[in-house]
Image: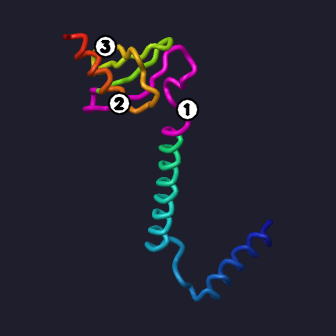
Amino acid sequence: MRPFLSLIIFSLSATNALAGGAEPPFSLAATLRLIWGLLIVLGALLVVYALAKKKLSFLNAGGGKGTITIIEMHHLMPRKSLCLVKVRGQEYLLGLSNDQINLIAIINNPPDTKDFAATLATAEADNHDSEL
């Protein structure tokens, strides 16, 4: 065991001597390179996580496999949102806040497109017609 350890120490000192003693093992440049590499890896992991959360359906809350499906959510303020929900074939536009949920409109004829702006315009027109 002792000859093996002395061989490792000799080879490390010989390598350092051949390299001209370029930099000590704990220099500022080496530390900055290490931190920069870690930041790049962390950034790449965060990008992959964000894409996976946004694109993969098994990470979404609803998943779309049950009788209640969240079609789309539109965040208005930090704790206020509009939510288009489909329950047993019927679509509902809900207003969500920090402590309550309000039914804004029942969508009678859901449009063929999943465009939130078109759905909202249809719901506003239906509510305006029902008020008259």
Q: Kindly state the secondary structure of the residue where label 1 is placed.
A: helix
Query: Which residue is at 53% across, 41% downward?
Result: 52
Dot 1 and dot 3 residues touching (CB under 8 Å): no
Closest to the observer: 13 or 6?
13
Residue interval drawn in magenta:
53-80
Q: CA distance from mark 3 to mark 2?
A: 18 Å
Along the viewing direction, whichever of 7 and 114 lies nearer the viewer: 114
Q: Locate residue 10, reporting x and y percent.
A: 71, 79
Secondary structure beneath dot 2 equals helix
130 versus 23 height, above or below = above
Horizontal side of 124 relative to 113 (left or right) equals left
Residue at x-position 37% and y-position 31%: 116
Q: Position of residue 50 (x, y in %)?
A: 47, 43
Q: Which x, y percent locates residue 100? A: 28, 15
Q: Which mark is residue 24?
A: none
Residue kind at label 1, given as amino acid type: Ser
Residue 57, disc: 1
Label 3 amino acid? Answer: Leu
Please name the residue that numbered disc 2 is placed on: 118
* Residue at which label 3 appears: 103
